[in-house]
Amino acid sequence: MFEINAAGVYYRDLNRQIRDAIAAGQKEIRVRNVNGQYYIGDGLRGNATIIIEGVPGNDMAAFMDGTTLIVKANAQDNISNTMNSGKVVIHGNAGDVLGYGMRGGKLHILGDVGYRVGIHMKGMKRQAPTIVVGGTAGDFFGEYMAGGVLILLGLNRKPGIPIVGDYLGTGMHGGAIYIRGDVDKNICGAEVGIMDPDAEDEKVLKESLTEFCKDLDLKLEDIMKEKFRKLVPVSLRPYGNLYAY
Amino acid sequence: MFKNLAPPEYLATIDQVKCIRCKRCIQNCGWGVYSWGGDKVLINTSKCVKCLRCYHYCPEEAIQIVDNPTRFKQNAYWGYNNIRNIKRQAETGGIPLTGMGSDLPYTILFDNLLIDACQVTNPSIDPLREPMELRTYLGKKPSSVDVEKGKDGKLKLKTKMPPQIKIDLPVIFSPMSYGSISLNAQKVLAMAAKECGILMNTGEGGLHEDLLPYKDNIIVQVASGRFGVNPDYLNAGVAVEIKIGQGAKPGIGGHLPGEKIPLEVARARMIPVGTDALSPAPQHDIYSIEDLRQLIYAIKEATNYKPVSVKIAAVHNVAAIASGIVRAGADIVYLDGFRGGTGAAPSIIRDHLGIPIEYAIAAVDDRLRQEGIRNEASIVAAGGIRSSADAAKAIALGADSVAIATAALITMGCTTCGKCYTGNCSWGITTQRPELTARLDPEVYAERLINLIHAWEHELKEILGALGINAIESLRGNRERLRGVGLDAQTLDILGVKPAGR
Amino acid sequence: MDHNYQKDISGCGLTGLISKKKRRLSGAEIVKSLCLMNDRGNGLGAGYAAYGIYPDFKDFYAFHIMFDEPSVRWTVEEYLKANYHIEKIEEIPTFPVKAISISPLLVRYFVKPLKERLVGEVQEADFVVNSVMKVNSEIEGAYIFSSGKNMGAFKGVGNPCDIAEFFRIEDYEGYIWTAHTRFPTNTPGWWGGAHPFTLLDWSIVHNGEISSYGINKRYLEMYGYKLTLLTDTEVAAYMLDLLIRRHGLSIPTACLALAAPFWKKIDDRDKDEREALTALRQTYGSALLNGPFSILFGHSKGLVGINDRIKLRPLVAAIKDDITYMASEESAIRAICPNPDTVWAPRAGEPVIVDLD
């Protein structure tokens, strides 16, 4: 495995080292002593795997296309911004605005996430992104969602901590959100309908969560013990009557 | 039962004696004004928007579209639009939408600025027979360069220059997305941009593969909806533009109505067919200036440091905002003024928010100079550039280049009817209906747009010649060569321009 | 950045000479050359600049200052005393001339910045420039019109012969001379408006109106220059100071910025040169002097003549032994050098650069 020591290295130099290593044909790269370097994996292509030790900086995996990033710690904001394909696995918590405008690939987070996660996600048939969050999420989860799949598990939750914040799925007009446990209609955006998953949904959940469990060393049976609820847009044109022509 | 208590704005009329019943008007009207009544053409004039498509395609000149003489009672305070909008809101409870830039009679500063000319003490220059240079480079410039003379006596550059975008004249096309305009309209822009050595801008709707041959003349845009943004897209053009705001609707987002989202557009944007494409007001990864810096550099990292443009609407604090944008690392600051066009905006926003581009150019250029960072970014000014004279005035106030959209659409048949948001454009421009877009033959209309750009190019050269300068950089920011007419002292002070006669 | 200025417009004639071997020549020569071109001016301004005239004080900045009122003198001297060691103060010798009835009080100071005033990274030259900017823009009625070492400018309202007589130009000996006769079309009558215009060791005489003045001025203001004189000449002087002294460009390279080649010519060069010239134009677009001009600029190490890139103003050069002459008209050279070794008209935008040995 190719190793890079990121201690004290500025992001531009670190990311250049990573790009050079991938250009030289390295398939597995371990980056040690990362702390706050921005843009790791930004725009990267190809199927290399990068293991990140330490807390990576903002905008990790932005525009990424195919690469796999595994973070062995918590991570910050804006992960997988407009990501096209590939995978990001985070063995900890992560911050706000994750998977903004995400177009494909997977984002797996073991712990809790912040506000505005999975907003503006896109999807077109098979080209669709998936985000699975093991812990809890803040407000505006899945805002403006137009495609793809968002799964929120709420594992290891302390008593009294809600699984998700307010304005869930506000502005949603495509895609699907799955929440483990029940959902209060009151916290949902006006555009959201709540239903029980059907057989097709169970298939999607099982497939996504099997991979999630494998990545993060969890047991699928434990997760599937509790029932899921599915959130979908009630209208393709939630704002059809907003304007006078 | 009380729908449409506003009388129709226009009366579509057919001279039944001249009419030969050829039904061309029925085919051509995208709005459904005309229908066949068995022996003659029937008219539903309330649908007419005066786009004049039928008029141009009537072989007998039998059609006339006249302003409806039946209006609300004349009132200098309660204008037609006020009354009509209230009635519409009473009927629907909705927000009246509109297209195009604001048509309200606010003072037009461009029309109160006049350009200098040489007489005796310095000579004018003959632009047709002597060299006259309009070439412009957009991008960050160093404050100084290091040039060394080699042993062979030849100069060699020692400074690493930031990337520069070469344009043959300082007039480029403003962003208009695939979705808001038809693919054929985008092709017209792309073909003309390539032929004229300038740029078109994808807007926020992805880059259709048909435009790839023109990628050296294309800026790709990233906005809050992130439509069509992937690594190929970011790397396809000569620069990436982050859109923060638009002059016609500062502070509010984009909203492409579902009528304009057929399968092809939906695929490019990766959203469901027929949904409204939402570009919300904020980019949710930019809540502060340091976040903008973060996105700028995320894009630079993903594109091996292509130039990044940041487009903002001209608002009250535009100078400070622009300074922040430059310090955040942008290579180009794109200012879009109050008069800037739109495919769809609430008319209440379009007509009442923002400031005209003339003030914005002056304020931003001044501020960047005061801070000693004017060289750090180019200024592109847009928002109601109607002629090469407007362009010259904008450049003299301090812009590196202007950008035009409405003027370009007019070459494709647009009559500024302002109904772009309906998706019914009979000229095939702001519609996705295949029977309408097919009318806009890219080759034919590109030629018309190329003609316009070449004509403006000649006019700009004539203006420079009259000013006695033979390079556009000597006009850029040269406010000494402008004078104000009928402007108050404070306005002149903001513009940095003397009154005529001084 | 006040835009409510009234720009000064004038036509003129210019002449200059340099002895490469640093032979000090009497001012009588240059006076004779300039007076031949009397008709290029209108009697409302003339001036001379010379290098090598103060050998005894060559390590001191020679400030030539004009005062509209004697009372202003004390304000300026207080400022100078607070910031400079003053080696010598004397009134500039002048002699009564019939045609010149009114003149300002003219005093010269040989000075050096006080060490303790040069804090941090401030270079001595920048300190002097700032002083000149401060006095000229902030002290009403006082004007520093010369601030170089071992050089000086002498100028005023009058025709070339009268100004020469007034200052007794023939009594000075220098190895570089420039001179200028002026045809102002507005605001005549101010002595500071005459050429040469100087800053530190730069001295400029200039013919023609720079049509790009507005942007050149704003470009310089971005770098802290205060353009108080509102003449093209001032623009040219500050531009040279910025490009050569502060940005470190060589004189030929600076000339390529001020009178840039056309894109067509740049595009035809091979790759390296094309890159260098393109970068220069991209970077210094606002420094391009556009419009008719011919300029002579003297500095402590030589003399340069240059005209605009489509040759809208005349310039003739000639060489005789170690002396190079440049002037608006060949006859002005022939008046003092009847049989030069060579005479030529420099091409548009191509500088004539003469360095001292």
Image (cartoon, coloured by chain):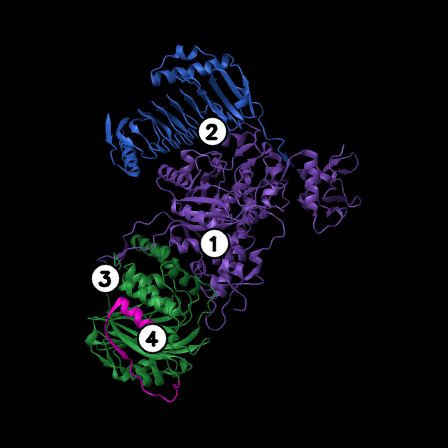
The answer as to whether the residues below labels 2 and 4 share one chain is no
Q: What's the distance in space between the residues labelled 3 and 4, CA to CA?
A: 24 Å
Q: Is C96 in the magenta?
A: yes
Label 1 sits on a secondary structure element that is: helix
For chain A, the rendered hue is blue
Where residue B176 appears, as percent x and y from the top left, is 52, 41
Label 4 sits on a secondary structure element that is: helix
Quarter that holds the N terminus of chain C: bottom left
Asked if labels 4 and 3 touch by Cβ distance under 8 angstroms, the answer is no
> In which chain is the residue bearing label 4?
C
Where is mark 4, residue-wise? C73
Where residue B200 appears, as percent x and y from the top left, is 48, 45
| Front position in the image: B367 or C91 | C91
For chain C, the rendered hue is green
Instruction: Give the magenta-colored segment's residue range.
Output: C73-101
Where is mark 1, residue-wise? B363
Where is mark 2, residue-wise? A119
Label 3 sits on a secondary structure element that is: helix
Camera-near label (2 vs 3) is 3
| Mark 4 crowd level (few <14, some 14–19, many ≥20, 10 Å Cα) | many
Where is mark 3, residue-wise? C116
Q: What's the distance in space between the residues labelled 2 and 3, CA to CA?
A: 61 Å
- Where is B428 relative to B497, above or below? above
Where residue C269 appears, as percent x and y from the top left, is 32, 56
Going by the numbered disc 4, the residue's amino acid type is Arg
Going by the numbered disc 1, the residue's amino acid type is Ala
Q: What's the distance in space between the residues labelled 2 and 4, CA to CA?
A: 71 Å
Camera-near label (2 vs 4) is 4
For chain B, the rendered hue is purple
